[in-house]
Amino acid sequence: MMVDLSQIKEHAEVIGADGVHVGTVDHVEGDRIKLTKKDSGAQVEGATGSHEGHHHYISKGLVAEVESDGRVRLSANADVAVTFEEEK
């Protein structure tokens, strides 16, 4: 079942399947979630490299659900999810 991206609100927290913070939603752009620049590329324990200072995008395919509190939960753990982030 695909998640309806229209349920995702600006400034919602994006978390990995493990509950670890991945980023904050800037807005939805097409079939991707654009993360805020301030929070985008934040270091996640176990992830390599840093990509701070520009926007990152999360593909719709990584979104497992939008929780009742508005948080966006991904299907991958945070340390894996950041490796799938797209830069622009």
Image (spheres, helix red, strand yellow):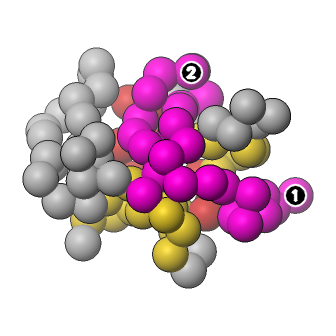
For residue 25, say whether it is visible. Answer: yes
**Which residue is situated farthest in the front direction here?**
10
Q: Residue at x 42, y 58 (%)?
A: 26
Membership of 77 in magenta stretch:
no
Q: What residue range appears in magenta? A: 1-26
Q: Report the side of 53 relative to 15 (left or right).
A: left
Element type at mark 1 = loop
Classed neighbour count for the residue bearing mark 1: other residues with Cα under 10 Å, few (<14), some (14–19), many (≥20): few
Classed neighbour count for the residue bearing mark 2: other residues with Cα under 10 Å, few (<14), some (14–19), many (≥20): few
- Amino acid at dot 1: Met
- Which percent across, then down, holds residue 63? 64, 51
For the residues labelled 2 and 1, say whether their Cβ atoms are less than 8 Å apart.
Answer: no
Query: Badge 2 is on which residue?
Result: 19
Instruction: Give the mark toward the camera: 2 or 1.
Output: 2
Q: Report the side of 69 relative to 29 (left or right).
A: right
Q: Residue at x 55, y 43 (%)?
A: 12
Q: Is residue 23 above or below residue 55?
A: above
- Amino acid at dot 2: Gly
Q: Report the side of 61 relative to 37 (left or right).
A: right
Query: Badge 1 is on which residue?
Result: 1
Q: Residue at x 61, y 29 (%)?
A: 17
For residue 75, say whether it is visible. Answer: no
Residues 27 and 44: in front is 27
- Disc number placed over residue 84 in the picture, else none: none
Question: Which image quarter is the N terminus in?
Answer: bottom right
Q: Residue at x 49, y 46 (%)?
A: 11
Question: Which image quarter is the C terminus in?
Answer: bottom left
- Which percent across, then down, holds residue 70? 69, 39
Membership of 8 in magenta stretch:
yes
- Residues at marks 2 and 1, CA–CA distance in whole angstroms: 21 Å
Element type at mark 2 = loop
